[in-house]
Image (cartoon, grey):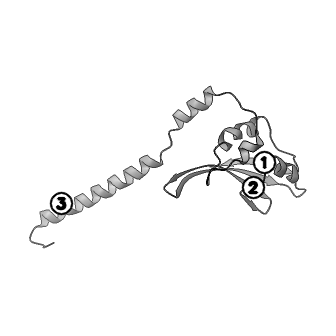
Amino acid sequence: MDNNHPGLLQLNVSFMQLNTLLLLLTIWCLSCNNGKAKKAVSETTTAIEFDTTKWRTKDGDDYPYRDELLTYLTTNNKLKGWKKDSVLAFLGQPDKIDSNYLFYSIAQKRLGFFPLHTKTLVIKLAADSTVEWRKIHQ
């Protein structure tokens, strides 16, 4: 680009800024989660019974039933005080174990293969291998 046309240079910079802005806006829109629609669906469904087979069902990298089964675990079955062996027999092997923590993947939203949002059930074990607490990490 030559310096004899400064207006052309400004126009080129403006198009670059506009393209960058549009790219960021597109990424932001794709990463948004429509929580209202999901909430409306979950409010109309009845509580389901826990099914170990569904909890352990894996489709590629995803667990298609864990998010809906999580409601049962957090409302009807607190897990607190359970021994580690009982948790493993009930939920199966966790996706990750780190010291006294068990991590169960619940759901993950991706843009391509990049994770945008991950939901995980975290269970902390006390020194005597009983469940001290469980939390949902998002």
**Which of 62/137 is in front?**
62
The amino acid sitting under disc 1 is Leu
Q: Alpha carbon of mark 2 to alpha carbon of mark 1: how far?
A: 8 Å
Residue 8 locus on image (x, y percent): 14, 63
x then y, percent, for residue 35: 53, 38
Q: Residue at the spot x=61%, y=32% of the render?
A: 42
Quarter of the image for residue 18 reads bottom left
The amino acid marked with disc number 2 is Pro
Which residue, given by chain and number where applicable, does mark 1 sit on?
Answer: 91
Residue, disc 2: 94
Q: Are marks 1 and 3 in contact (CB under 8 Å)?
A: no
- Left or right of 26? Residue 116 is right
Label 3 SS: helix
What residue is disc 3 on?
Answer: 11
Q: Quadrant of the N terminus?
A: bottom left
* Relative image position of residue 94 (x, y in whole percent): 75, 55
